[in-house]
Amino acid sequence: MQIKLLPDQLISQIAAGEVVERPASALKELLENSVDAGSTQIQVALIQGGTKLLKVTDNGHGIAKDELELALTRHATSKIQSLEDLEQVGSLGFRGEALASIASISRTVLTSRQQASSHAWQISAEGTQGQPISPAALDEGTIVEVHDLYFNTPARRKFLKTENTEFGHCEDAFTRIALSRSQIGFLLQHNGKAIMRLAANTPQQRITDVLGNEFASQSVWLDEGNGGLRLWGMTASPTYQRHSRDTQYVFVNGRFVRDKLIAHAIKQAYQDVLHGDKHPAFVLFLELDPSLVDVNVHPAKTEVRFRESQAVHRFIFHSLHKALGKTSAEIQASQPVQAPFNPFTPGLSMPRQQVEIPLQNRSVFDGNYQPTISNGAAIAQQFYGQMYGDLKPTNVSVLGSIQENALSEDYLNPISLSEAVLTQESAPQAQQYPLGFALGQLHGIYILAQNTQGMVVVDMHAAHERIMYERLKSALSEQAIATQPLLIPMSFYAEKVEVATLQSLQGSDTLQQLGFDLATLSPTTIAIRAVPTMLQDADVVSLARAVLRDLHEYGASRVLQERQNEVLGTMACHAAVRANRQLTLTEMNALLRDMEATERSGQCNHGRPTWFQVSLNDLDKMFMRGQ
């Protein structure tokens, strides 16, 4: 066949196939033009999901009469003039083909007025047919009306979905622009009904207005900068986990992007705090020199390339990892919610006196064995008394008096403690202990504690699991997981796959680095000679089997590099105190103190919450006090 030049109309329609995939794509392009025009107010009106009408009105600086026709011409733009401009583009749009592509597949009306003009001017186009410019009425800014999208390309129109589906995509496009420009007021209407109205506000308030109070209350605000890079925004607690990626927004220099490098860095930051196949939620803004990022990668401008990709990856990972591990003394008390991450002040660990707690003559290898809390839970009564000593309310006599360096039995009585309501005035030291002090256990699973704000409910297994996990991770990073040899090696019947996995580790120091010493005694027997010191009170047979299972699944060569969090999580889970393990008050309080000193103690390493706060106000409402 003979090679021929394509007509301009067909070229525009081909370009429209790339740029205008659906009504939402057209809306995105028009909104970006309005933002680039310096608008402070933008209104969007849709009919039938944008297929019948898509109208965008702004109060930007407008288009001159002589440039209206150029505005509907391919590759005509005011945003770049040279290659240097393209390499450091700061505007959202720059290709100069969006309006031309939209006009080639719809009935488009463009009305605009500059502030210095006596009146507005209007130009319309219907596919290939253009109309002459005519006067129009408009105070200022620009109005773009797109009627009957794909009216002249029926094959393309058949691929459109239902009205609700197309509107949903339009709403997503609107939301992304609204999140990226909090200084602009937005209005979204569909079929004559106002759907979303957003006043100009701060970035924090805009995120709250768009994504809701629940997201904002369970999120951490971050603002980190280093080496010409800045990352700021809100990232949600792992407990605010989602089944889909519908609440993930990343903006690079104000432009919404989907970038694999950024997504991987975020995933790495959340890897040991997110449960299962759930997804994190975040609104993040990355700012850097425009010359260091290439936005001219995809026709829809949703993909970018970084000149220093590894530096960007490291910066995003470390910034998020730091934010997720922050400590804070603030606890949400206005509603029964789990406090975000680790809302505690650092360095508040109790004195660690290693005192053995008798296990009522249980065998260490009993299948029903429950490990002790080996993190200094058996604290001295002297210190326990000192914690409560300065918290005695002046108007409560039931607690009695405390002799110096002695502990009154009243302080060991949960009923007496529950009667002593600790207030800000009577308990100045209570602010040092945000999780308060234990009152007792509930069904052998939860710890009930009292703090100045009300009641705290702690999942003791999940909390202890996080503490053990963080300690194991820290010890492994320093190659300092201490090993405890067993006085009498423990042997157990092993499956063939377990024996094969252990034999495959010969010549490798993987098990030694994890603190284990295992040996094959026969084709069906494995001996346990040593275990990590931190886990010596665990069910060592179940622990060894679990570690061998992980080594078989992930491969010994990958465990310490790529899958160490999974293996350490398995070890921590087996070492953590189990349900129905009866704890003393001193053990419970030691667990609370260690939670306060542990990063990310707001959730276990599976992403499940470890504690919730219920305020006195909420309790009063439940019992209708004061009504």
Image: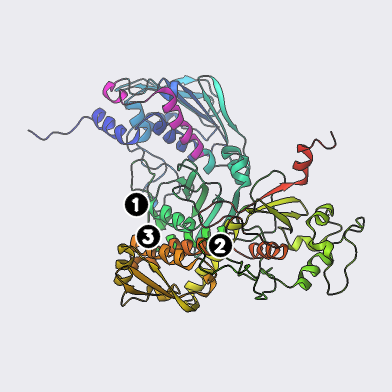
Q: Amino acid at mark 2?
A: Ala
| Residue 365 in sight in this render | yes
Q: Which residues are magenta?
A: 152-177
Q: Residues within 10 Å of mark 1 (few under 14, many from 20)?
A: few
Q: Residues within 10 Å of mark 3 (few under 14, many from 20)?
A: few
Cα–Cα gap, marks 1 and 3: 17 Å
Front position among marks 1 and 3: 3
Give residue 260's position: percent from left, percent from top: 38, 52
Give the prevailing secondary structure in the magenta stretch. Answer: helix
User: How far is disc 1 from disc 2 in space, using C-alphas?
Assistant: 60 Å
**In the image, is residue 175 part of the stretch drawn in magenta?**
yes
- Please report whichever mark, 1 or 3, sits nearer to the chain's N-terminal start: 1
**Viewer-nearest of discs 2 and 3:** 2
Mark seen at residue 307: 3
Q: Quadrant of the C terminus?
A: top right
Marks 2 and 1: in contact by CB < 8 Å? no
Quarter holding residue 504 = bottom left
Relative side of 586 to 215, left or right:
right
Report, in whole angstroms, how far the alpha carbon at label 2 lies from the one at label 3: 45 Å
Mark 2 sits on what residue?
576
Is residue 156 covered in magenta? Answer: yes
Residue 579 placement: quadrant? bottom right
Query: Does label 1 or label 2 sit earlier along the sequence?
Result: 1
Residue 83 disc label: 1
In the foreground, 258 or 386: 386
- In the rendered structure, the answer to whether residue 608 lies left or right of residue 431 reads left
What's under tag 1, amino acid-wise? Leu
